[in-house]
Image: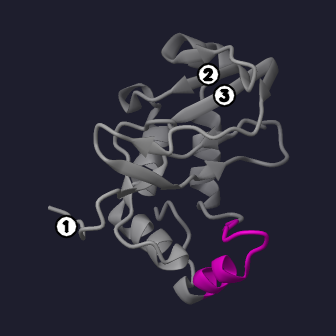
Amino acid sequence: MNLINPFDRRALREQVRSAKPFPNLCLDNFLSPQFAEQVCQAFPSFEDAQRMGRLFSAVNEKGKVQVVESEKFSPPVAQLNQALASPEFLDLLSYAFEIPNLLADSELVGGGVHQTGPQGHLDVHVDFNYIPERALHRRLKRRMGRQGGAVGQGCEGLPALVPADPQPLHHL
């Protein structure tokens, strides 16, 4: 099964270039319907996420749980994590946004699975834009969610990163 639906690279680049008020991209139905349903069904409940991850209580992230240990992900969520970090998907994003050498953050700093519970609040905030230990800048943030249906849970994808050093990065 193809997990991510195919897209016209040139059309995506044009969509990014013409987006307002800043370059951005919204891909409706980017996962195959069967796989999207598997991910939604396997997405942890707020209570399960609390047992697996870290609960936030700051004013801008009250009642939010984050799980960054990918070994705790259910198989469909782990597959999604791998698909979003794949060289093919990163190449598509690099082309669309005209940002060379995008990398996926294997440590999911600021990424992973996020869940906001009852009475929770996630406000606009800026965080984890630079990882000094690895000299990496976060260049893109991917968010995913599901609209409609009984399963209204969403998840936040792993951040894509580029090296802070302008030297070209070579994949081994």
Q: Secondary structure at mark 2?
A: strand
Q: Secondary structure at mark 3?
A: strand
Q: Which residue is mark 3?
A: 115
Left or right, residue 152 beside residue 109: right
Q: Which residue is mark 2?
A: 65
Where does the image place residue 13, in percent across and percent down from the top left?
58, 82
Which corner quadrant of the image does residue 114 belong to?
top right
Which corner quadrant of the image does residue 172 belong to?
bottom left
Residue at figure coordinates x 58%, y 42% from the top left: 39
45 inside magenta stretch: no
Closer to the eye: label 2 or 1: 1
Q: Secondary structure at mark 1?
A: loop
Q: 145 or 141: which is nearer to us?
A: 141
Left or right, residue 121 beside residue 84: right
Where does the image place residue 127, in percent across and percent down from the top left?
57, 37
Vertical side of 85 occupied by 106: above or below: above
Q: 143 or 6: which is nearer to us?
A: 143
Where does the image place residue 19, in percent across and percent down from the top left?
74, 75
> Label 3 crowding class (10 Å Cα cut-off): few <14, some 14-19, many 20+?
many
CA separation in Å, label 2 and label 1: 34 Å
| Amino acid tagged 2 | Val
> Label 2 crowding class (10 Å Cα cut-off): few <14, some 14-19, many 20+?
many
| Amino acid tagged 1 | His
CA separation in Å, label 2 and label 3: 5 Å
Dots 2, 3 in contact, CB < 8 A: yes
Work out whether mark 1 precedes mark 3 in sequence or the reverse, and give the earlier one: 3
Residue 170 numbered tag: 1
- Res. 137 in view: yes
Left or right, residue 125 beside residue 109: right
Vertical side of 81 occupied by 170: above or below: below
Q: How many marks?
A: 3
Q: Which residues are magenta?
A: 11-27
